[in-house]
Image: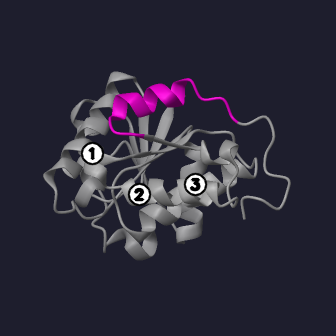
Amino acid sequence: MERICVYCGSSPGHDPAYRRAAREMGEELLARDLGLVFGGGSVGLMGTVADAVMDGGGEAIGVIPESLESKEVAHGGLTDLEVVESMHERKQRMVELSDGFVALPGGLGTLEEIFEVLTWAQLGIHEKPCGVLNVAGFYDGLVSHLDGATEAGFVSPTHRDLARVETHPGALLDAFAAYEPPSEPKVGPEDT
């Protein structure tokens, strides 16, 4: 692995633990000589994780659509900032640049981004690890939902396991390093 994509909030959230976790994620990427790919903003958790990487001399690549460049206050101190035309192009480019995907706390965009790459993993479109960093119980409800969808027969246990959940960045990146994709992507009616 060379680069990890981190999806996270353009806000810091109310709990200081979220910002600490974003900083720890950046520091853990540095310690493992992994580059960062992210949404390109200088604000919120996005800015925190990027600053941690850049402060340590690491690689941070931002990808931001033109329409959000000024709204998200594009980060000016990155290794590279790619400005693209649309959100769809942004997400595709982030996938192309990355070898794994992490969701830190965030809002609707963070959820949409991590679920898209999880779905792509389920379908065999990519074979890269995906996970969420469950900071201060932020993703407890999501984990419950995924477990419930599995118990109800909508997600196979194999595909449920695509969403790795950890509470510390190091544990999540350890799981990524050991990741082996499912031998068969989704082929039947389950998991829809």
Residue pictured at 30% horizontal, 51% vertical: 137
Q: Along the polypeptide, which appears first: circle 3 or circle 1?
A: 1
| Amino acid type at image mark 3 | Arg
Q: Would you name the residue on which mark 3 appears?
A: 93
Position of residue 11 relative to residue 16, above or below, is below
Residue 167 lies within the magenta run: yes
Position of residue 87 relative to residue 187, above or below, is below
Q: Residues within 10 Å of mark 1 (few under 14, many from 20)?
A: many
Q: Would you name the residue on which mark 1 appears?
A: 22
Quadrant in which residue 130 is drawn: top right
Query: What are the residue bounds of the magenta stretch?
Result: 166-181
Q: Residues within 10 Å of mark 3 (few under 14, many from 20)?
A: some
Residue 134 lies within the magenta run: no
Quadrant into which the C terminus falls: bottom right
Asked whether residue 85 appears in the rendered view, the answer is no
Is residue 150 found left or right of 10 in the rendered image?
right
Q: CA distance from mark 2 to mark 3?
A: 10 Å
- Residue furthest front in the image: 151
| Amino acid type at image mark 2 | Gly
| Residue 107 position within the rendered picture, expressed as x and y whole percent measured from the top left | 36, 67
Mark 1 or 2, closer to the camera: 1
Residue pictured at 31% horizontal, 38% vertical: 25
| Residue 75 position within the rendered picture, expressed as x and y whole percent measured from the top left | 29, 56
Mark 3 or 1, closer to the camera: 1
Q: CA distance from mark 1 to mark 2?
A: 14 Å
